[in-house]
Image (cartoon, rainbow, N blue to C red):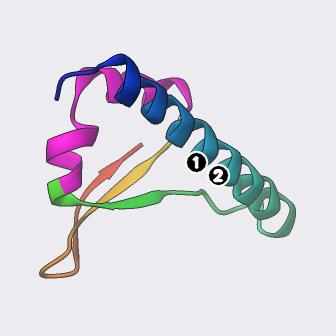
Amino acid sequence: MYVTRTNNSLLHYLFSLNRAVLDIYRYLLEETAPDRKLYVAIGAIIYKSFFNQDVIQLILHKHQLPLIVVDTETEEITQWIN
């Protein structure tokens, strides 16, 4: 994937929006069930084609966003990433 100014801005916007939603959900989870940890589930194909990129991994690490990678055809968890 080539990052241009247009899709870089779009990526930034989408990550910012997603981050805001996750922050709200994480806050509510901390208040109602502090013993639980929030994971974001994504399909294995999306993980391999998008989330596996170095720059995306840096963002995920910076924001400490744990992932569950799911095979959408078998509906099985293939990977837990803390």
Quarter containing the C terminus: top left
Q: Element at badge 2?
A: helix
- Say above or below: 44 vs 9: below
Q: In this view, does 62 lie above or below 80?
A: above
Q: In this view, does 73 lie above or below 37?
A: below
**In the shown orientation, is residue 73 left or right of residue 43?**
left
* Magenta span dominant secondary structure: helix
Where are the magenta residues, as a range? 46-63
Residue pointed to by mark 1: 18
Name the residue located 51 percent from the left edge and 42 percent from the top edge: 14
Cα distance in 3D space between marks 1 and 2: 6 Å
Residue 56, located in which quarter of the rendered image? top left
Q: Where is residue 44 in the image (x, y as percent from the top left)?
A: 18, 58
Task: Give SS at disc 1.
Answer: helix
Assess whether residue 60 is covered by the magenta stretch: yes
Q: Label 1 is placed on what type of residue?
A: Asn
Crowding at label 2, few (<14), some or many (≥20) Cα neighbours within 10 Å? some
Compared with residue 35, is residue 75 higher up or lower down, i.e. above or below?
A: below
Tag 2 residue: 22
Q: In screen coordinates, is 9 left or right of 44?
A: right
Instruction: Please provide percent x and percent y for residue 27.
Output: 80, 53
- Quadrant of the rendered image containing residue 13: top right
Q: Do the residues labelled 1 and 2 touch (CB within 8 Å)?
A: yes
In x, y percent, where is residue 54? Answer: 25, 22
Label 2 is placed on what type of residue?
Leu
In the picture as drawn, the residue positioned furthest to the top comes out as 5
Taking the spot 33% from the left edge, 60% from the top edge, the residue there is 42
Q: Whole-percent x and y of residue 16?
A: 61, 36
